[in-house]
Amino acid sequence: MKKFNVSKFDMEKIHSAIPDAYDKYVNGRVSRREFLRFATLLGMSATAAQVAAATGAGEVFNALSAAPARQDIVRGGDFISGMQLQLIDHPARLSWVEGSNIIRHVAEYLTETGPDNITRPYLLEKWEANEDVTEWTIYLKQGITFNNGDTLTADDVIFTMNEWLTPDVGSSMLGLISYWGGTQNIEKVDDYTIKLHLDSGNIGVPEHLFHYPAAILHRSFEGDFIKQPIGTGGFTLEEYAEGERIGYKARTDYWRMGADGSPLPYLNSITYVNLDKDASVAALQAGQIHSFVLPRPSDWLALKDLPGIVTKTASSAQGFMIRMRVDIEPWTDVRVRNALKMCQDREKILQLSYYNQGDLSIDAHVAPAHPEYFAHPIPAYNPEGAKALLAEAGYPDGLTVTLASKNDEAEPAIAQALKEMAAPGGFNIELDLTEPGGYWDRWTEVDFGITIWTHRPLGTMVLPLAYIADADGKPVPWNETRWVDEEFTTKLRQAEGTLDIEARREIFKDLETIMQERSGVANSYWRQVWSIASDKVQGYEAHPTSYDLLHEVWMNA
């Protein structure tokens, strides 16, 4: 039995902040998950971090007990899944999970955040950060080829990064990595090494490289992935019938090896068929598909105890954000926004719309799943206070507003519950609920809506996507509320460069308070997510961001 040990000297050689985080873990001041996430973000391998965590807890760590059990993996199989199929063009413009699941089997990412919420190198061999995390050196794996036969090099990565940072592309990456400072701060060291010279330090660079619009493109890409489906992934795009079905075929020259030592992927093919949730449930029960993407709580309840079907659960930072555009009346007045926030009976909304399968929230886009999360008291339902605020804002007789959203998940139940709860507070809410495409076509434009936001592993990752301005002072592409607050932005930048977990949490205490008191979002809860699949499907996990990671999935006969 081979035993391992990782000393604090070994940790310090990777980054000087890791030993301090280790001491906090040993003394019970941060959790094991927080230590693992922090250490791996600063460049420690996941295996070494797990060794350190185990020995710090007084455990014996050995290769045999740590390795996953070897399985008799069956190669081949054709995996079929139900999913709402979104229109795809430029991967950097992806705006929801379904679209990313279309791309990710063909085009891959520099890093990968797994179902355990730990980020690991993927197309990268490793990364290194300097003391104040203002300079990151990333090292590409060598020998990776695109499906057109070309070798992946730094030129492809830099081309892709330039696409992210080109305003005309319209990528949400522009807001997320605004701290990079621009393309001039990307340095090609050699064909497999890139240095990022950041305008301000940021702990989250490896996480940001797995944001779903960050798929790495071939340097010849001209703007439409369906016309140029070139990527390093294990599958090639073989069929694309818009709004109907998408088909993929396994590559025979893919670069990765599986747990059994044989080449990946294990599957022969993947097919997505365009199905709504009700049709997906029926198709899974009939054996026509093997899984479906983004099951609802009602689907989980209906299917979780059925023979032949396996359900798995993950906690997440996914939320149905009720958002108000602060540049359009009446939402320009913070009193009106706060009056609306007071009209949430959060426990009832969670019960009515999501069967209590989630965690209650304040009106801030930070969840218990985030390491920086600071727990505030959950605000009480207060329609009388809302009514008084509306009167103070000049609406003594109440206010009529229209709430827009899509109709395929929990949004209709949330909207109906809010409509009823807000009536005593002086709001007459009219509902505008459409098919998903009808909302996603306008989601950043409606003045009052419910937008489902997916999980991000760090609080410092989600906030710059939606609540800051760009270098020209314009709200970043996904800032659907148009809310920009100078104090908030200053504290966020401070948090992004703060390595100490406890100190970062103290900054987030203020960030959450500012959002509760001044922002244009309300939120009642963070939802659980599920994977639901036929028991023929092996290795299919519930991912907190609802990603389909299928390269190591295989099928029983």
Image (cartoon, rainbow, N blue to C red):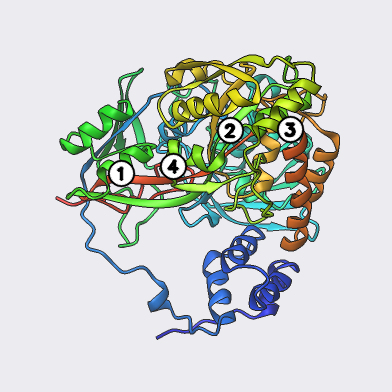
Q: Amino acid at mark 2?
A: Met
The 10 Å Cα crowd at callout 4, few under 14, some 14 to 19, many 20 or more, is many
Disc 3 + disc 4, Cβ < 8 Å: no
Residue 387 vs 507, above or below: the answer is above
Q: Earlier in the sequence, mark 2 or mark 3?
A: 2
**Foreground mark, 2 or 4?**
2
| Coordinates of residue 426 in the picture (x, y in percent) | 65, 21
Residue picked out by circle 1? 301
Q: Amino acid at mark 3?
A: Ser
Q: Amino acid at mark 4?
A: Tyr
Residue picked out by circle 3? 519
Residue picked out by circle 4? 547
Left or right of 310, for residue 226: right
Q: Return the residue nearer the eye: 172 or 9.
A: 172
Residue picked out by circle 2? 321
Whether residue 334 is visible to the viewer of this picture, yes or no, is: yes
SS at circle 1: helix
Identify which residue is drawn at 52% across, 43% down.
347
Cα–Cα span, label 1 and label 4: 21 Å
Q: Amino acid at mark 1?
A: Leu
